[in-house]
Image (cartoon, rainbow, N blue to C red):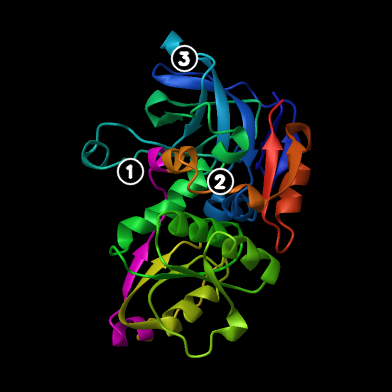
Amino acid sequence: MLALSNDGGPHLTRDQPRPERPPGEVRLRLRLAGVCDTDLQLARGYMGFSGVLGHELVGSVVEADDPALLGRRMVTDINAACGECDDCRERDGHHCERRTVLGILGRDGAFAEELVMPSRCLVPVPDSVPDDHAVFAEPLAAALHVLDEVEAGAPVTVLGDGKLGLLIALALAGAGVATTLVGHHRDKLAIAARAGVTTLLEAELGARRAQVVVEATGSPGGLSLATRMLVPRGTLILKTTVADAVPFDAAPIVVNELRVVGSRCGDLRRAIAALAEGRIDPTPLIVARYPLSRADEALAHAGRRGTLKVLVEGV
């Protein structure tokens, strides 16, 4: 099977074993996948992951316990949890201690002809949502998860005009939140501006302060900027994950009594609903697409500084 594996570094292989499908899991054939900054960090050694990369996808069900699922387009929560622990029973299983995570932790990912995931992780894609929109469901769910930490009516400032920062800004604006996006690139900021987001170059910030800041720069320096911008007792929502160690000064957090929140995965059903309702159009972020047979090139392209969303098409 054709796949992009990260065994000893990312490389394309045609000998990847076809994944076995345990009871309760579904076999998906890849339709479309997106390259995420997390994939790039994993390729650089983040979390020591070995296996097939990729976790943003749309797939078609080709094998399942329930024959009614066959042929249906699906997106998937990336957390394959045990379904039995307190976190699974009482919350969403995103912090289940026994979970595997698609293309990130203990489970081969989406840059392959086929993958398997538990049926409970899957969310159907309505006919009205094309693949080019649905492939953003997983990162969009993570973007919308910011809403769970923001008081109704509170304005939000997002730092970073890369893939994630832009998507968070579009998601918040689509939900009616007064949103400001801060970045370094006028062309990227223009994507958010067209969706009603207030935009600023970082050089234009001056002494501007904010009550809520989402740090999505993908840079170790983003944390320092975010803490400087926050008013006392403000809220810092962290989205960046990087392979390298991040220098960290806790003094502003202590002195200003800042609330710091880590934010990872979100609710896929909320993301699909937002796409189906037309509240968010993520397609302006797409800059390139490659066939699976050139997934290694797709990863390299996505790793070029300043690149937005690169897609990988199934065979």
Question: Closest to the observer: 81 or 168?
Answer: 168
Identified by mark 1, the residue type is Glu
Q: Residue at image x 47%, y 54%? A: 171
- How far apart marks 2 and 3 lie (CA) works out to 27 Å
Q: Residue at image x 78%, y 45%? A: 297
The tag on residue 168 is none
Using a 10 Å C-alpha cutoff, classify the residue at mark 2 as few (fewer than 14 neighbours), some (14 to 19) or many (20 or more). many
Question: Pointer 2: what residue?
Answer: 49
Q: Does the CB distance between marks 1 and 2 fall below 8 Å?
A: no
Image x and y of residue 258, in percent: 31, 78
Q: Answer whether residue 165 is visible to the viewer in this image.
A: yes
Image x and y of residue 264, in percent: 42, 53
The image shows residue 307, relative to residue 227, as above or below, that is above
- How far apart marks 3 and 1 lie (CA) works out to 26 Å
Of the image marks 2 and 3, the number of the one nearer the N terminus: 2
**Residue 31 lies in the magenta stretch:** no
Question: Pointer 3: what residue?
Answer: 64
Image x and y of residue 291, in percent: 76, 34
Question: Pointer 1: what residue?
Answer: 97
The image shows residue 234, relative to residue 69, as above or below, that is below
- How far apart marks 1 and 2 lie (CA) works out to 17 Å
Indicate the secondary structure of the residue bearing disc 1: loop
Nearer to us of marks 3 and 1 is 3
Image x and y of residue 78, in percent: 46, 39
Q: Residue at image x 56%, y 46%? A: 49
Indicate the secondary structure of the residue bearing disc 2: loop
Q: Answer whether residue 109 is visible to the viewer in this image.
A: no
